[in-house]
Amino acid sequence: MFSALRFLTILPLPAHIPHAKWLTRHGWQATFTGIFIGILCAIPATLAVALSLPAPLSAALVIVCSIVLSGALHEDGLADTADSLGAPKDRRLQIMHDPRCGTFAVLALIVSLAAKISALIYLFFSLDFFTPLILTHAAARSAFPLWCRFLKPHPKTGLARLLDNTTPNAFSVLSPFFLTAILAFALLSAFSAAIFLATLTTCSLLLLLFFRRKFTFLSGDLCGFGEQILECALLFCLCALY
């Protein structure tokens, strides 16, 4: 699991840990990384409640914790992808590599943060701290191997160097969804877990089609964009269930 942790977080892990094999052969590591991040994010929320701080502050602390742990990796992908959507298809990769943030990037980040904070405030009152954080962080990263299997990474992206002309095998694609299913049925009722998994599967496939139609390639920024969209969609799903 340390390979995915080193790639998806800023934790100071040994540099000699290989990157590529976890994505092509052991995609389940993405789910475990999400569980780890979800647990760590629940700690400041628990402390905030113990100190009788308001729920909005607890939710904001959770978001800050997740951003710090991931080094804003996924938020950066969301911003870069949002900026590129307003450009012609042949210039989208160039815009995604531009370090400057445009209007679409800023708006996407504002909407995403507002949506997640609002959903977490509601869930903290109606559910608990650990269930939504662990489930959404684990599930939102489960589609990475799926996208990498059915979309070819652009040769000028870091994802292409990471995969090194290899493709995730069937086990790597299916195991994250299987582990997410076990987690969902363990933490939710059977009906809620089924709805949650249906939402995850549907949104993951829709994002795959979106990437294929709008970009025809895959990159790390697109994976980050997809993770953020899945995170918001799954939080909304839990809000609807509770």
Image (cartoon, helix red, strand yellow):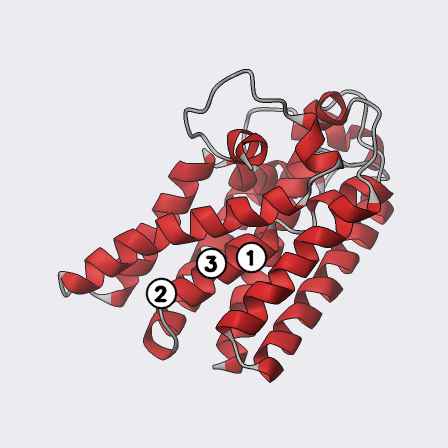
The residue to which callout 3 is attached is 134
173 left or right of 191?
right
**Residue at coordinates 79% horizontally, 22% vertically from top-left?**
164
For the residues carrying marks 1 and 3, which lies nearer the camera in this image?
A: 3
Dot 3, how many residues are within 10 Å of its Cα: few (below 14), some (14-19), or many (20+)? Answer: many
Q: Which mark is residue 129?
A: 2
Pick whichever of labels 1 and 3 is earlier in the sequence: 3
Task: Provide the residue designation for mark 1.
Answer: 231
Q: Nearer the viewer, residue 63 or 177?
A: 177
- Name of the residue lying farthest toward the top: 16
Judging depth in this view, the residue of 48 and 20 nearest the camera is 20
List x then y, in percent, for residue 170: 83, 47
| 2 vs 1, front mark | 2
SS at mark 1 in the image? helix
Q: Amino acid at mark 2?
A: Phe
Spatial CA distance of label 1 from label 3 is 11 Å
Dot 2 lies on which element?
loop
Please say if 157 is above or below 242: above
Labels 2 & 3 near each other (Cβ < 8 A): no
